[in-house]
């Protein structure tokens, strides 16, 4: 009777979990109650596999409701339980959910967990879930501009799905993979390929019964964008008109409607048809403003600035260009680059130069960040594959040992010795070839990186010399000429000339600063502490701060890599600037020390502090975090309102 009762409870638990995953028929609260009840029953009958399934469902619901602390706590518990049970399928899903958590937070972490899940699904021959992970990986690679990696991941996912019968979920995921390929090829300016794969995606979506209009419109918009970028404006316009003819689009998805309307208006503009312009742009912008969609308003403001600039309405062009720049500062991405480049075109003289210099610095920063992320993707893939190869090697060696042991029972010791020696020789040769291949790849990567760095430094020096020797010399000569003209005794003439001279001096100082910043580098034989002292002296005067430096004499700076020293120098620069801008502090304390074999840096100010849990991270904190991650360090931020701010950074000394 007990086994029959237990079987009924197992059926009940399975039914509850099915209901908990049914988003179409049940509300979130209902699904959460189903999951909790399933978990309680599973604990009552003490079936670990059902306990794990119930807890995974609860964790997924926490993530859906954005209860992130509860999700992370339960996700960690579920992973430990799945490892203890040896449940590879559950481990794959747990890693995938953690990837979902990091998707909009840290692309490298999301990539790491999706990659681990993909390898698990590959190992257990779960083709569908492996293809889903490859889709997620491909989208992240595309977003981080690893277009070749995204292309490879997409085709691998499509190849897996091609082996399945054409079911709804298979067709849907394949459509998403085709769509991602279309976006990748559009970014690579391979417009014929982009159009081909967008059409494939659209064709699959139209085959799905009950597929809502929104996914069709998304593909139509992507297809129209590819035609627009390829210069086929009339075809693009016909697709945009098809999307805008949907009477429910503006009501159900106003943000998408505004974006399509802007694309439609800009395509007409590129096609030399300016009827209803700028009214179409303004309608799209008003819709974004009404729903608080600031991100999509960036490109609309850019299009308005471009339109008014070509109409020679410079004031209007500046207004919309500066609006686009101010909004895009929140995101610090390619949209900010486009806004700065647009301002460099619209503005004149020194303002245009200033915007272009800002563009150059930001472009360098974004390229470094993107390269670092792509390198991390490669390293994650390599390390995971290397670990799998080692595990497979261990498995093969164990199998070989068992076979040889059996042979040993029926064969002589001599035969066993020969077979064993031959196996070891093959293994050694394979390892040597693999090592040689890895060394060749690594040397090629180093050589390519050296060429890139050499070209970048050469260009920086050229710009520095141009600013210093060309423009600065001309400005200095002009100032001397004005000085010589100051012999006139008219008070007004002297005052005007003096104003011009002071303005030229300010420009001269600014150009010297740009020249110095472009050519700054650490001298190999210089004292690192002296360099820090010089920085603090300059910034103390500039920011009106009292800077206190403390360091341990026992620190041997020659043992510490230049990479760490450069990042620490830049972190102090960033912290001083943040303190001056935001903290209203009077004093700042810098402390270098060692701890457990690591090099540590504390930066403490007596400013007003802030509520870290409620404040959005600014570019300063993001830059510091990025630098700490690049040297594999640990960052701790302690702050509160009216309590000052303390940054603690700990990094291994021998960081490569």
Image: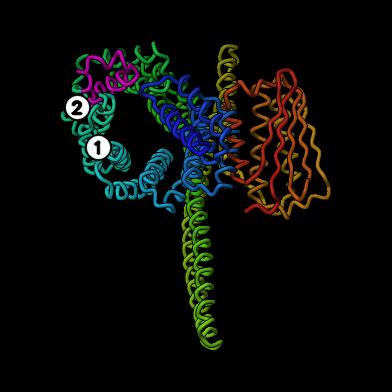
Q: Tell which of 194 and 445 is nearer to you.
A: 194
Q: Quadrant of residue 189?
A: top left
Q: Tell which of 108 and 489 is nearer to you.
A: 108
* Residue at numbered disc 2: 239
Q: Position of residue 427 (x, y in %)?
A: 50, 74
Q: What is the span of residues highlighted in magenta in the rendered image?
A: 243-270
> In the displayed structure, would residue 497 be above or below residue 220?
above
Task: Please say whether residue 87 is one of the residues in the magenta stretch.
Answer: no
Q: Position of residue 528 (x, y in %)?
A: 73, 47
Please rate how many residues cluster around mark 1, counting C-alpha atoms within 10 Å: few if below 14, some from 14 to 19, many from 20. many
Q: Tell which of 262 and 84 is nearer to you.
A: 84
The residue mark sitting in front, 2 or 1, is 1
Q: Is label 2 in a helix, a strand or a loop?
A: helix
Q: Could you tell which of marks 2 and 1 lies nearer the N-terminus?
A: 1
Q: For the point 38% across and 22% down, which residue is it? A: 296
Task: Please say whether residue 269 is one of the residues in the magenta stretch.
Answer: yes
Is residue 361 visible in the rendered image? The answer is no
């Amino acid at each position: 009777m007990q086994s029959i009762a237990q079987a009924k409870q197992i059926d009940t638990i399975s039914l509850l979990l099915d209901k908990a995953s049914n988003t179409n028929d049940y509300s979130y609260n209902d699904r959460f109650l189903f999951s909790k009840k399933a978990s309680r029953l599973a604990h009552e009958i003490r079936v670990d596999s059902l306990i794990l399934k119930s807890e995974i469902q609860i964790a997924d619901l926490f993530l859906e409701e954005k209860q992130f602390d509860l999700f992370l706590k339960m996700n960690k518990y579920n992973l430990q339980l799945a490892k203890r049970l040896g449940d590879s399928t559950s481990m794959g899903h747990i890693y995938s959910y953690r990837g979902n958590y990091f998707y909009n937070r840290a692309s490298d972490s999301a990539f790491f967990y999706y990659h681990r899940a993909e390898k698990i699904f590959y190992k257990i021959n779960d083709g569908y879930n492996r293809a889903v992970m490859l889709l997620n990986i491909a989208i992240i690679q595309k977003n981080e501009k690893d277009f070749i990696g995204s292309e490879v991941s997409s085709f691998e996912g499509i190849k897996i799905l091609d082996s399945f019968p054409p079911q709804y979920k298979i067709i849907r995921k394949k459509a998403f993979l085709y769509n991602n390929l279309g976006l990748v090829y559009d970014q690579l300016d391979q417009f014929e390929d982009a159009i081909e794969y967008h059409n494939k995606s659209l064709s699959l979506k139209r085959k799905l019964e009950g597929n809502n209009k929104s996914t069709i419109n998304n593909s139509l918009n992507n297809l129209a964008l590819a035609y627009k970028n390829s210069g086929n404006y009339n075809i693009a316009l016909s697709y945009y008109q098809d999307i805008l003819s949907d009477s429910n689009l503006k009501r159900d998805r106003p943000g998408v409607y505004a974006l399509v309307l802007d694309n439609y208006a800009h395509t007409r503009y590129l096609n030399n048809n300016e009827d209803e312009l700028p009214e179409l742009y303004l309608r799209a912008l008003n819709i974004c403003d009404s729903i608080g969609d600031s991100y999509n308003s960036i490109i609309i403001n850019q299009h308005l600035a471009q339109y008014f600039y070509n109409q020679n309405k410079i004031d209007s062009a500046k207004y919309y260009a500066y609006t686009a720049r101010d909004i895009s500062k929140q995101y610090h991405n390619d949209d900010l680059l486009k806004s700065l480049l647009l301002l460099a075109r619209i503005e004149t003289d020194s303002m245009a130069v200033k915007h272009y210099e800002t563009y150059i610095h930001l472009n360098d920063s974004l390229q470094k960040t993107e390269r670092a992320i792509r390198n991390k993707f490669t390293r994650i893939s390599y390390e995971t594959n290397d670990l799998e190869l080692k595990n497979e090697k261990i498995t093969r060696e164990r199998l070989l040992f068992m076979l040889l042991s059996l042979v040993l029972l029926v064969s002589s010791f001599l035969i066993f010795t020969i077979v064993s020696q031959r196996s070891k020789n093959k293994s050694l040769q394979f390892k040597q070839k693999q090592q040689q291949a890895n060394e060749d790849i690594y040397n090629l990567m180093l050589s390519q990186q050296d060429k890139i760095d050499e070209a970048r430094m050469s260009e920086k020096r050229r710009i520095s010399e141009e600013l210093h020797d060309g423009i600065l010399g001309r400005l200095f000569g002009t100032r001397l000429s004005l000085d010589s003209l100051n012999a006139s005794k008219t008070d007004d003439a002297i005052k005007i000339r003096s104003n011009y001279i002071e303005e030229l001096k300010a420009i001269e100082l600014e150009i010297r600063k740009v020249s110095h910043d472009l050519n700054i580098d650490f001298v190999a034989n210089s004292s690192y502490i002296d360099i820090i002292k010089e920085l603090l002296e300059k910034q103390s005067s500039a920011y009106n701060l009292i800077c206190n430096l403390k360091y341990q004499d026992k620190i041997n700076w020659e043992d510490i890599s230049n990479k760490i020293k450069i990042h620490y120098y830049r972190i102090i620069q960033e912290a001083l600037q943040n303190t001056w801008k935001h903290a209203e502090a009077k004093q700042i304390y810098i402390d270098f020390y060692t701890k457990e074999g690591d090099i540590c840096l504390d930066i403490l100010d007596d400013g007003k502090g802030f509520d870290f849990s409620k404040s959005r991270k600014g570019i300063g904190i993001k830059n510091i975090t990025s630098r700490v991650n690049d040297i594999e360090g640990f960052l701790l931020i302690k702050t509160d309102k009216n309590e000052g701010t303390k940054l603690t950074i700990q990094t291994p000394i021998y960081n490569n």
